[in-house]
Amino acid sequence: MSDNILEVKGLRTYYRTRLKENVYAVDGVDFVLEEGKTLGVAGESGSGKSTLALSLMGFYFPPLHYNSGSIVVNGTDIMKLTKDQLRSQILGREIAYIPQAAMNALNPTLKIIRFIEDIMKEHRPELSAKEVWDLAAERFETLNLSSKVLNSYPNELSGGMKQRTVIAISTILNPKVLIADEPTSALDVTSQKAVIRLMKDLLEKKFIRSLVFITHELPLLYHVTDDIVVMYAGEIVERGTAQQMIFDPLHPYTKKLMGSIIVPEAGMKGHKLEAIPGAPPNLKKVPPGCRFADRCEYAQKSCREGKIQNKTLDGRIYRCIFDARTLREWYEEEKRTQGVIGR
Ligand SMILES: Nc1ncnc2c1ncn2[C@@H]1O[C@H](COP(=O)(O)OP(=O)(O)OP(=O)(O)O)[C@@H](O)[C@H]1O
């Protein structure tokens, strides 16, 4: 078996609207995640990040549908499993998912321990109530979350504590991969740091082996992930190491995304802050060629023709007709002519 814990090839999934139109929110996505690695997924709102997460978990319930491609989790092609097999063998055990705003979805009438009891009832029915409590208490203490939290109701916890609790609950079965969708959004900076620390602890203590961290704030990923993919209009437009993507983006969209951050991270103050003008294309009917062309200041006629192939350079991949040298020259020129804020 390879060291790849997650292999995604040619994945295409879509929403079927009430008007019987298809919205291709994930449109031909390929990537691999090696055991022990962390992957960031960045992109503006609507680029398909959450749909990718749902698709990876095999959550195909209308209006979301699978079209084509493969998702191999630790050697198992999940598209070949029945829903029951997926639930008993893969979800929670091999791959766990924390959806956006998960902390607000906790049933307020149940104590935290009850959520863990429910998971254990399904996956480790042999454990007694006391054993479940001991296991949960030990896990919470190891992760610097007091075991007192187990006896609390969700609404008794602060936002940050609630989010860390959700993460601890979701990883109680030691899944190989954790997919976290915007786990730090809507939190203050201190709570964001605590959530990131928790995810690092989970990795260091090997409670999880790999992490997929989804966010619209690309720079946040620098502190958390080894690699980053940037999504735009359902496609991955660039993939590289966090260092490459943040400090030397090649695709004009990645470059713009870096410039559109709201809160500059330490060490990234040199970036000009601006929203990306324009809007992504309608995913019901995408234009031919580069999907970013209408918003790209470097776009030429040939960008709007045919399928744009990926280019590779130093282990990174980017989907643009221009070569890296040309792109870097343009960016240098732009920096010279416009100057930067924050220096
Ligand atoms: N239930 C749905 N029915 C139809 N289209 C949908 C549905 N949910 C999402 N979409 C569309 O799918 C595309 C991708 O949305 P998705 O939520 O995956 O993006 P995202 O990058 O995760 O954005 P956000 O960060 O805002 O969640 C968007 O065009 C969105 O409008």
Image (cartoon, rainbow, N blue to C red):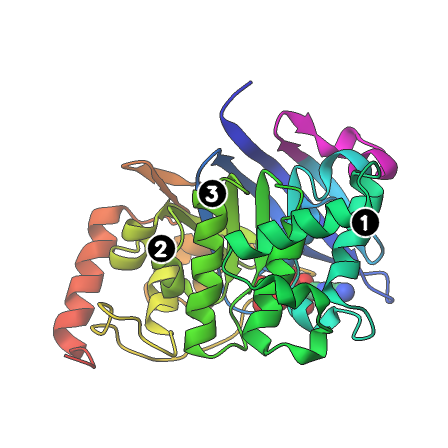
Residue 27 image offset from top left, x and y in percent: 62, 48
Q: Which residue is mark 3?
A: 205
Q: Give the quadrant of ligand 1.
A: bottom right
CB at mark 2 closer than 8 A to ligand 1? no
Residue 79: say if magenta: yes
Magenta stretch in the rendered image: 70-86
**Which marked residue is nearer to the observer: mark 3 or mark 2?**
3
Q: Which residue is mark 2?
A: 251
Q: Which residue is mark 1?
A: 129
Residue 7 shows up from this direction: yes
In the depicted structure, whether residue 183 falls above or below residue 312: below
Q: Amino acid at mark 3?
A: Lys
In the depicted structure, whether residue 185 falls above or below residue 239: below
Q: Amino acid at mark 2?
A: His
Q: Residue at 52% of width from left, 49% of height from top? A: 212
**Looking at this view, is 118 or 88 the one in front?**
118
Asked if disc 3 and disc 1 are in contact, CB closer than 8 Å, the reply is: no
